[in-house]
Image: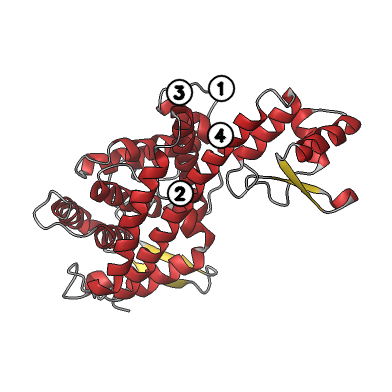
């Protein structure tokens, strides 16, 4: 197998730009709608949106790689990074590290990409790891860097990256390309074109011993933010994680040649869908504010605690809805009280009910607001 980096045209990717022009227009239109909707949020809801989307991206970019983190610890880490109030829990190294990296990506979006920035991200991402030889630097091991699946007896090689001896030269060229193609660079590229190439280009080099996928997605977010002139909060990792198979299939097809139109179409459609999810979050928070305004002074502390917990699940809500047992778990209320509380929330239009008896479930009634 001859990989993309082994071919004579590497890394001069070719593509049909007209195939993603429609997506570029959708993204720019969506960015304007997002900005307009964002202005309707108060400062507290803007903070919540930022924390929720960054933490959700951190969770999902880790889940793509098979690592499952604790949401509460991660959100506490991110809140501390922003200087906001947080609980005093001890945060595990993995949650601390990815939280630091994601906040730095958000804050430093305007800064040019550098080796030092990538090394810092890698240190953050590998916080607490003791199984890696190279942390905070490009890989140096002599063995081939391969993406492999299957058993040890019959492995399937999906990709083999350039050898470690080429890392500094490859990354010098990549960083120059990334900075030159920014909107204020020597050869600017359109937003989806630049972000899509940047992600594929970086993961094809695979410069680190581990963490390349997560850093590659962070680089794509940086590219989107630079082209739009502000942090985007676009839910890239959330959207990818919902169909990881399509993501890995698109990457695997793209790493065999340097004509990458199919990859760019996949990437552009994914980003537009991710932007739509961010719009859904903003709409969700606006409806949440309206619901609380309407219920002010009408619900007890137990009901408020349950609603707060439900809103923490975001637009997708509790899987399967809120049951009486979940309400007991959240509030500690006796069963008779639970029934009265839930019926009252339904009568006030805060929840709607689905099912009967032991199958009864409750859902946020955001259309009522």
Q: Which residue is at a point 33% across and 45% down the rendered structure image? A: 134
Q: Whole-percent x and y of residue 243?
A: 52, 64
- Please tell me which residue lies in front, 142 or 354: 354
Which SS class for mark 4?
A: helix
> Which residue corresponds to mark 3?
84
State which mark lies toward you, 4 or 1. Answer: 4
Residue 41, above or below 199: above
Disc 4 from disc 3: Cα separation = 20 Å
Q: Whole-percent x and y of residue 276?
A: 45, 55
Disc 3 from disc 2: Cα separation = 22 Å
Name the disc covering residue 87, or none.
Answer: 1
Disc 2 from disc 1: Cα separation = 26 Å
State which mark lies toward you, 1 or 3. Answer: 3
Q: Whole-percent x and y of residue 186?
A: 8, 54
**Quadrant of res 46:** top left
Res. 302 in view: yes
- Please tell me which residue lies in front, 198 or 348: 348
Q: N-terminal of the two: label 4 or label 3?
A: 3
State which mark lies toward you, 4 or 3. Answer: 4
From the image, which quarter does the C terminus lie in? top right
Q: Which residue is at a point 73% across and 48% down the rendered structure image? A: 321
Is the Cβ of the residue at disc 4 closer than 8 Å to that at disc 3? Answer: no
State which mark lies toward you, 2 or 4. Answer: 4
> Which residue corresponds to mark 4?
289
Q: N-terminal of the two: label 4 or label 1?
A: 1
Is the Cβ of the residue at disc 2 closer than 8 Å to that at disc 1? Answer: no
Q: Which residue is at a point 45% across and 23% down the rendered structure image? A: 84
Which SS class for mark 2?
A: helix
Which SS class for mark 3?
A: loop
> Which residue corresponds to mark 2?
278
């Amino acid at each position: 197998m001859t990989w993309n980096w082994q071919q004579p045209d590497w890394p001069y990717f070719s593509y049909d730009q007209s195939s993603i022009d429609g997506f570029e227009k959708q993204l720019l239109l969506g960015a304007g709608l997002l900005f307009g909707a964002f202005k309707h949020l108060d400062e507290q809801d803007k903070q919540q949106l930022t924390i929720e989307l960054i933490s959700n991206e951190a969770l999902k970019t880790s889940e793509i790689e098979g690592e499952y983190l604790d949401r509460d610890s991660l959100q506490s880490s991110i809140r501390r990074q922003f200087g906001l109030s947080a609980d005093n829990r001890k945060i595990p190294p993995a949650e601390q590290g990815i939280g630091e990296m994601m906040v730095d990506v958000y804050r430093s979006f305007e800064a040019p990409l550098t080796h030092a920035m990538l090394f810092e991200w890698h240190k953050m991402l590998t916080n607490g790891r003791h199984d890696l030889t190279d942390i905070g630097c490009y890989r140096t091991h002599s063995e081939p860097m391969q993406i492999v699946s299957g058993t040890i007896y019959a492995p399937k090689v999906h990709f083999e990256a350039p050898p470690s001896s080429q890392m500094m030269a490859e990354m010098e060229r990549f960083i120059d390309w990334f900075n030159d193609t920014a909107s204020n660079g020597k050869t600017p590229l359109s937003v989806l074109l630049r972000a899509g190439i940047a992600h594929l280009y970086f993961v094809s080099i695979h410069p680190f011993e581990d963490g390349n996928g997560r850093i590659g997605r962070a680089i794509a977010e940086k590219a989107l933010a630079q082209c739009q002139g502000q942090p985007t909060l676009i839910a890239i990792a959330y959207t990818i994680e919902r169909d990881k198979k399509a993501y890995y299939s698109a990457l695997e097809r793209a790493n065999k040649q340097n004509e990458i139109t199919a990859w760019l179409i996949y990437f552009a459609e994914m980003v537009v869908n991710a932007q739509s999810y961010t719009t859904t979050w903003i709409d969700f928070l606006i409806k949440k504010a309206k619901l609380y305004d309407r219920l002010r002074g009408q619900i007890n502390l137990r009901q408020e605690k349950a609603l707060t917990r439900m809103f923490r699940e975001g637009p997708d809500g509790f899987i399967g809805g809120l049951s009486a047992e979940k309400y007991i778990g959240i509030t500690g209320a006796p069963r008779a009280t639970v029934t009265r509380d839930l019926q009252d929330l339904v009568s006030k239009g805060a929840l709607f009910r689905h099912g009967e008896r032991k199958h009864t479930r409750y859902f946020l009634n955001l259309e009522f607001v």
